[in-house]
Image (spheres, rainbow, N blue to C red):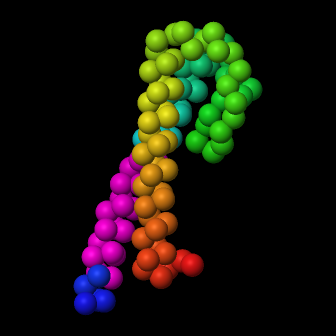
Amino acid sequence: MQTETNAADEERLRKIEIGYHLAEGAFNLASSELTTFLREHIGIVPSLTQTPHGIFTRVNALRLRHPELRRLETRQRETKQTRDKLLAERAELLHACGRIR
């Protein structure tokens, strides 16, 4: 019984890891597209923004009126939420499988 549970957990973990890696790539792409848009349309990347490696506070709220910018930021936020959800599930399963404490 325990072996069947472990095998099921291992398979679920494998699927979550695949999904997580895809979500991480989607988040990185969304972040790059947002940064590119900011450089091309606003002139510079604001000193405070969200990147794949950190979260910073946004400062110029008026620029949120641009519909393409809102779309890119929404996409980045959604891909980050998906990635974070899968990362949490992965951690739970790694703990359940005994790979981490």
Principal secondary structure, stretch drawn in magenta = helix
Q: Quadrant of residue 59?
A: top right
Residue 48 in the figure: left or right of residue 50 = right
Q: Quadrant of residue 13?
A: bottom left
The percent coordinates of residue 15 (x first, y second) are 31, 63
User: Is residue 12 in sight in this rendering?
Assistant: yes
Foreground pick, 78 / 29: 78
Q: Is residue 24 magenta?
A: yes
State the residue lying farthest toward the right.
47
Is residue 87 shown above or below 52?
below
Is residue 72 shown above or below 66?
below
Is residue 9 shown above or below 30?
below
Is residue 91 shown above or below 72?
below
The percent coordinates of residue 39 (x first, y second) are 62, 19
In the image, the segment drawn in magenta is: 6-25
Q: Residue at x 59, y 19 (%)?
A: 38
Q: Is residue 101 magenta?
A: no
Q: Residue at x 65, y 39 (%)?
A: 55
Q: Residue at x 34, y 75 (%)?
A: 10
